Image: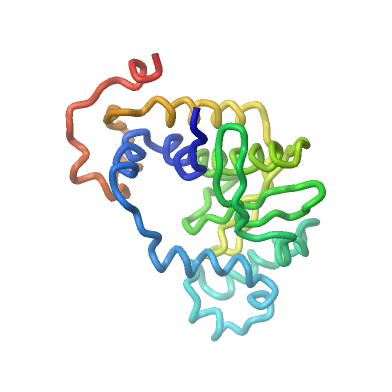
Amino acid sequence: MSKRPFYELETAAYCPRKLYYQRRDTVDVPDRVVDRRELAFEYDRLLDASPTDLADLPLELSPEEFRANLERAADGDAWSQLCTPDERERLVEGKDCRGVVHKVLDRDAPVPSMVFTGAPPNQGVWEPQSVRAVAAAKALAWEHETAVDRAFVEYPAYGIVREIDLTTRRKAAYRRALRTARAIDGPPPRLRNDAKCDACEYRAECGVKTRSLRSLLG
């Protein structure tokens, strides 16, 4: 079977129908996303930046809140590697998936760190983002022929970095997303989660006749 891109697995975990639309369209990365992602490679500078300089950046918090979050992140054991990773934006090919790992923290015992430009949950990470982080870890493990049992997730517009373990539950969510991404060849049913649908760029056209996801998965 073909290897699924990381972003497909993330979207499949979020909404299979959205993935169907994404495959149909050419999606450009917005400048806002590029600018926010770049913040993740400037932590050293941002930690020492003045409030005036921080106010000019694409942050989602006040300079004071952002700095406080970044100072907490700097207390972590992996801070120096997050600031100066061994590799950045590395394309990796796993057994079942492929994509770009934003940061590889240790080339000999690889640990991926994935950068997301939206808002973090109050605790932990969103499940679709967890799925993407697991995909990155599995692809690195496949290439290096070694176990990878943790990953980092970064929210640079908020100055927040969170470490996650690759638990059984997270791996199961990854496998579900992989099965879903492989099975889609027509529009899956609409979700009944208005919170997700409100923010979806395909909301206006999400009204075609659907087949059940159970039938897609067999």
Percent x, y of residue 133: 60, 43
Picture quadrant where residue 148 is located: top right
Q: Tell me which residue sits at (56%, 75%) in the image.
A: 63
Q: Nearest the camera: 29 or 26?
A: 26
Q: Is residue 108 left or right of residue 98?
A: right
Q: Nearest the camera: 142 or 85?
A: 142
Q: How many marks?
A: 0
Percent x, y of residue 6: 51, 43
Q: Is residue 78 left or right of residue 94?
A: right
Picture quadrant where residue 95 is located: top right
Image height check: is 194 above or below 46? above
Q: Is residue 211 left or right of residue 2?
A: left
Percent x, y of residue 84: 73, 66
Q: Tell me which residue sits at (65%, 52%) in the image.
A: 113
Image height check: is 192 above or below 157? above
Q: Tell me which residue sits at (65%, 37%) in the image.
A: 138
Image height check: is 34 above or below 218? below
Colour pattern? rainbow
Q: Tell me which residue sits at (36%, 59%) in the image.
A: 28
Q: Nearest the camera: 213 or 169?
A: 213
Query: Can you name the residue that lies furthest to the front here?
Result: 1
Percent x, y of residue 97: 55, 37
Q: Nearest the camera: 160 or 212?
A: 212
Picture quadrant where residue 29 is located: bottom left
Looking at the rendered image, the quarter that the C terminus falls into is top left
